[in-house]
Amino acid sequence: MNRSASFRVCFFAASLGACSLLGAKDGAAEYVTPPETHSPDGRYAVKVPVFHEDQKDSDARKDEVVDRKSGKTVAVIQADPAYNRSLNHHGTGEATWSKDGSLLLWKVDGKWTPDALVVLKLEDKGAKWQLDLLKTAQQALLERTRKAAPEKYAAAKKANAGSGSAFPDGFTVDVSADVEEGKGVKLPLSVHVDLTANPKEIEDFPANLDSYLDATVGEDGSFAVKAFHLGKRDGR
């Protein structure tokens, strides 16, 4: 779909309340603000880039939290962006808000783990703080696992070499946050992180290693580890 067609489609959709499209002259990047990203109080939304058919790869654009009334950017989400449509295993973005619209949990689904997971605290002047929960939680578990089982860690890292940037040190490190259905995001926020060297459970894999931890995100955006264990979490 070319740029002019994108405008026509999104203009029609916007008239039905489906989306809005923001852009600039001379071929500048366009964005949409899907209604499912709107905060409960209607004040904020997440603006995501439009991905075009002739676009070969992702680019430097980022998802942004915007004030719906003024259209001004409140915060640039510092993580891999979601686009207006799924790209292979890369999701479109999921916004979970607190009931008062002051807290946002932004998630972009990936194949084995999220491609992005960010918590933002908003106030009248803009973003008070932002936490890259995915990378923070992954690094916390990687560091503890490496210290607790250095030989197994090194062997698993070697076995999974070349897995790509979505697999830090070659491991699959999943991160999830507890949000009670219908009650929105609240602080402190409980976080669960699970690591495995062998997500496909291959029988003759040369270096099995699993670990997990539980943590919380505090009122100030701090990340505090509460428990760490080698081995698989019960039920996983």
Image: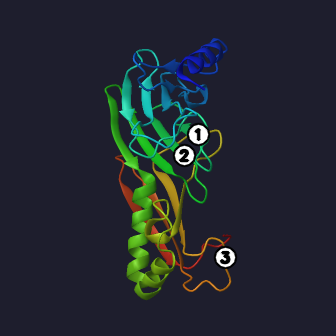
Name which residue lies at 55% across and 32% down.
Answer: 52
Q: Residues within 10 Å of mark 3 (few under 14, many from 20)?
A: few
Q: Which mark is residue 108?
A: 2
Instruction: Give the residue at x 53% y 25%.
Output: 32
Does 44 sit above or below residue 70? below
Pick the residue in front: 93 or 224. Answer: 93
In which quarter of the view is residue 194 placed? Answer: bottom right
Please identify the quadrant where the N terminus is shown.
Answer: top right
Label 3 sits on residue: 201
Q: Amino acid at mark 1?
A: Thr
Instruction: Name the residue beneath numbered marker 1.
Output: 92
Q: Mark 3 belongs to which amino acid?
A: Glu
Residue 204, label in figure? none
Marks 3 and 2 sit apart, C-alpha to C-alpha, by: 25 Å
Q: Nearer the viewer, residue 87 or 74?
A: 87
Give how far apart the Cα atoms at labels 3 and 1 are: 28 Å
Marks 3/2 in contact by CB < 8 Å: the verdict is no
- In the image, residue 181 sits, relative to residue 235, either above or below, namely above
